[in-house]
Image (cartoon, rainbow, N blue to C red):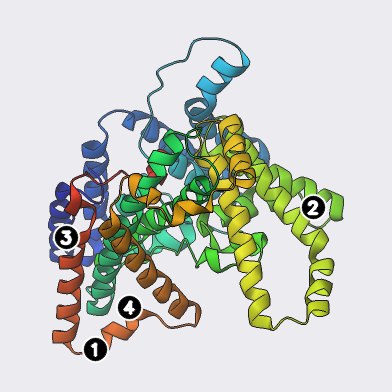
Amino acid sequence: MTYTSFASYVFTAIIVVIYYLVPLRARWVVLLMASSAFYMLAYKTGWWLLLGCALLSYGAGLLLSRCRRYQKAVLAAAVVSCMLPWFCIKNGNFILGSLLGRPSVAWIVPLGISFYTMQITAYLADIYAGRIEAQKNFAKYLLFLLFFPQLVQGPIPRYGQLFPQLANGRRFDEACFIRGFQRILWGFFLKMMIADRAAVIVNEIFEHPYLYTGCYVLVGGALYSMELYADFLSCVKLAQGTAGLFGIELVDNFKRPYLACSVKEFWHRWHMSLSGWLRDYIYIPLGGSRKGRAAKYRNLLLTFAVSGIWHGAGYKYLFWGMLHAFYQIAGELSAPWQERLYQVLRLPRSCQKGLQRAGVFFLVMTAWIVFRAESLTTGLVMVKNMLVVFNPWIFFNDKLLTLGLDWKEWCVLALSAAVWFWIERRQEQGICMGKVWLQKPAYLRFAMYLSVIVVVMVFGSYGFGYEPTDFIYRGF
């Protein structure tokens, strides 16, 4: 059961009605039962591993709050124990096959293991640091881990931000409910109109990496950058929207990352809950930037190595993470030279920002090509072929129409992307389109919502004969 399935719509609608019918003090119980049912319906095996990690971390949290003498040992043992299943599942076969030459193992993969493992680690680390108190009620703690809108694909919540909303229950708030509905519509637009349509071309190019070279790779890389962002932003908006129907606010995960003027800024805008987790629980404990430039760069490399390993097993993910660390180090070292060059050229500030954004997008896109490719070797070959093969005529001889989309579908994709870009520009200027529409008369809002639904149903991915793809980050 996924966010885009009919069963999910019915399930959510039933739970919303029950949630607001029961007394306020019992609403957390409704969410716990619903989240448990969602987990079992979505994935019938592996629940025992989540339950085991929940019991272990719950007990460790109580020990951390009561036993000051052995806190470090308790924290280390609990974190390692909860991380071990995730590490074995995500990296076990890579280690067995590539490093040890042994046959692979058919691991049981619990739903959302990468996300709830990080929740547990942050929860225990925050108790150790004195930022939060340990939860004494196991059922309420289990709800924090299981809350179904964010369980599968994030964002990765912090206990202090999410738990009070879950435990205290929320009264019906019309504005919050409508805002949740708006986010759900926006999520469907991004998924059906952009991500799934771009995926047709991306899959064709990356499944035949030695057939498509030069500008084909450039098109595939640019569209994959768009697909990945639209897909992940979509699932976050659907999660936020679903939570909003219950009056619960989930943290934002993106802040228009492709408008960043540096790779460092990109990571302040991209997958912010993961970036914040890596900063607070890897980078800063390693020493951050407090012990000189060399130590700072070492810590940056280690942090992004962890980021690469979190995303998947294999050399390409590690390379992708380290490449982003290299981008940041090179960007910091070259910053004075870049600024001096802009002064010499006397470029207006708007031109500088435009060049910086284009450069950041190209660097990030290049890394995404390696990330998406079948292997590190294939990814590097694709990047090389993009740079050395000259074939710009494919933009003018209809060759792009042989990749899976006809000209009408290309037009729908282009217009949808233009709408998306316009809205992001408005958001960058501090204008929230959702709030703007909340101020409109009810009949205009209803007409707008109905129009979006009709457009997605007619022109979305359902409209031209293929099933919507699963969310990309569900695989992580």
Mark 2 to mark 4 CA distance (whole Å): 40 Å
Q: Position of residue 414 (x, y in %)?
A: 36, 64
Mark 3 to mark 4 CA distance (whole Å): 21 Å
The residue that label 3 is drawn on is: 457
Mark 2 to mark 1 CA distance (whole Å): 50 Å
Q: Between disc 3 and disc 4, whose residue precedes?
A: 4
Asked if the residue at tag 4 contacts the one at tag 2, i.e. Cβ–Cβ closer than 8 Å, the answer is no
The residue that label 2 is drawn on is: 296
Callout 4: 10 Å neighbours few (<14), some, many (20+)?
A: some
Figure quadrant of residue 41: top left
- Is residue 432 toward the left or the right of residue 22 in the image? right
Q: Between disc 2 and disc 3, whose residue precedes?
A: 2
Q: Can residue 246 be seen at all in this image of the molecule?
A: no
Which amino acid does the dot numbered 1 rest on? Lys
Q: Nearer the viewer, mark 3 or mark 4?
A: 3
Nearer to us in this view, 338 or 126: 338
The residue that label 1 is drawn on is: 440
Nearer to us in this view, 68 or 221: 221
Q: Secondary structure at mark 1?
A: loop
Which amino acid does the dot numbered 4 rest on? Gly
Nearer to us in this view, 103 or 200: 200
Q: Quadrant of the N terminus?
A: top left
Residue for point 67% across, 45% down: 323
Q: Can residue 445 be seen at all in this image of the molecule?
A: yes
Callout 2: 10 Å neighbours few (<14), some, many (20+)?
A: some
The residue that label 4 is drawn on is: 434
Q: Secondary structure at mark 3?
A: helix
Asked if the residue at tag 1 contacts the one at tag 2, i.e. Cβ–Cβ closer than 8 Å, the answer is no
